[in-house]
Amino acid sequence: MFAWIAGRAGLLIALLLGGVALCLAPVPWLAAHGVSALMLAMLLGMALAGVRRPGWQPGLNLAKGPLLRLGVALFGLRLTLADIAGLGVRVWVIDAAVLVSTFALAQWLGRRLRLDAPTRTLIGAGSAICGAAAVLATQPVVRADAQRAGVAVAGVTLFGAAAMVLYPWLYHCLAPLGLSERAYGVLAGSTLHEVAHVVAAGQAVGAEAAASAVVAKMLRVLLLAPFLLWLAHAWRRSGQLSADGAPTPRPPRPWFVLGFVAAAALAGSGWLPEALRQLLCQVDAWLLAAAMAALGLDIRPAMLRAAGWRPLALAGALWLWLMLGGGGINWLLSR
C-alpha cells in the first residue's frame, strides 16, 4: 500500500495543488486580474519545482498524460456538436496554415541555429500542434533521446505558459478595436501550445472564448495524426533511421479527441441529467488544474541551463511567430 502511494506521490501532489488553485481562484483580487484556476495551478507547480523529487515523476506523468486527456475529453460536456460545427471550415484552414508555417520555420531557423534534426523537429512539432503531447508523440518517430525530448518539452511549456498569461491581457487591449470573444478563442486555440494553456487562456476571458478556443484547439490536435504519418514517411525517405535500421514506430492516435466529440454529442442530446453534467464539469476542472500543476512542476531551470541557449532561442522565435504570424493568419482568413 505504501509503495503504491509512493509511486504516485507526484499525482497526489498535482491533485492537491489543483484543488488549492480551484479554491483560491474565486478570490476577488485574483479574479479581477484574470488569474484563472488553471493559470494559478501552473504557477503553484512552478513555485514548487525546486523541491520536486525524482520519485514524483511517474505520478506527474499520469497527471499531464492520461488525466489531462481525460480532462480534455470531459471538457466536451461544456459544448455541443452545434458549437463545433458553428466554427466551420475556416478554423480547419487556420489551424492547418499555422501548423505548416510554424513547422517549416522551425526547420529553417533550426538549421541556422545549428540544431540537429531531432531537436528542431521536436520543438517544431510541440510549437506547431499541441506542446508536450506533440513532443512525446514525435519522439519515437524521430528516435530522439530523453534529453532532447526533455529540452523540447521544457522550451515549449515555458513559452506556452508565458503566452497563456499574455493572451488575456492582449484580448483586453484589442477588444476595443473589435476583437470578439469568439475570434479571440479561435486565435488562442490555433496558436497556443498546450491544450491546458488554451483552456486557461480562454476561461480567463469568458465562456464563449473558452468554448471556441477549445474547439479550435481540438481541430488542431486532430491534425497530429496526419502530421505524424507524414513525418514518419519523410524521416524514412531522408535516411535518418537508427543505426540498427529498425522501422519507425506507428504513430499514436489521439483518442481523447474522439472522447471530446462524444462528450459534446452527449451534452447536446439531452440524455445526461443537468446535475450530473455539472458534477462532471467540476471533476473536469480539477483534472485540468492537476495537469497544469504537473506541467509547472516539470519546468526545471537545470534542464534549461544544460541545453544551452539555441533550443530556447528556437522555441522563443516560434512563440513570437505563433503570436504575430499566427495572429496575421487569423486576421487574413477571417476577413
Image: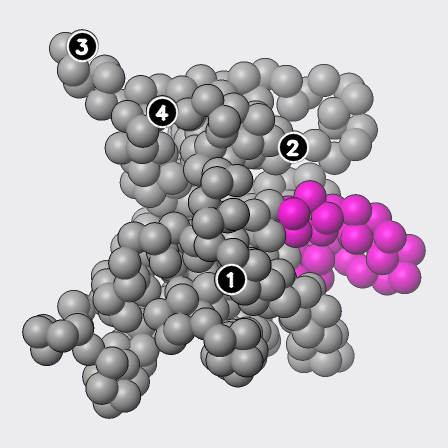
Q: Which residue is identified by label 2?
A: 36
The stretch in magenta equals: 162-187
Check disc 1 and report its element: helix, strand or loop: helix
Q: Which residue is identified by label 1?
A: 311
Q: CA distance from mark 2 to mark 4?
A: 27 Å
Q: CA distance from mark 1 to mark 2?
A: 29 Å
- Vertical side of 104 occupied by 266: above or below: above
Q: Which tag, 4 or 3, sits closer to the chain's start? A: 3
**Kind of residue sitting beneath label 1:** Pro
Q: Residues within 10 Å of mark 3 (few under 14, many from 20)?
A: few
Asked if the residue at tag 3 contacts the one at tag 4, i.e. Cβ–Cβ closer than 8 Å, the answer is no
Residue 253 visible in the snapshot: no
Q: Residue furthest top?
A: 2
Q: Residues within 10 Å of mark 4 (few under 14, many from 20)?
A: few
Q: Which residue is identified by label 3?
A: 2
Check disc 3 and report its element: helix, strand or loop: helix
Q: Which tag, 1 or 3, sits closer to the chain's start? A: 3
Check disc 4 and report its element: helix, strand or loop: loop
- Vertical side of 333 occupied by 322: above or below: above
Quadrant that contains the N terminus: top left
Q: Which tag, 3 or 2, sits closer to the chain's start? A: 3
Q: Which tag, 1 or 2, sits closer to the chain's start? A: 2
Instruction: Report the predominant secondary structure element of the magenta stretch.
Output: helix
Asked if the residue at tag 4 contacts the one at tag 2, i.e. Cβ–Cβ closer than 8 Å, the answer is no
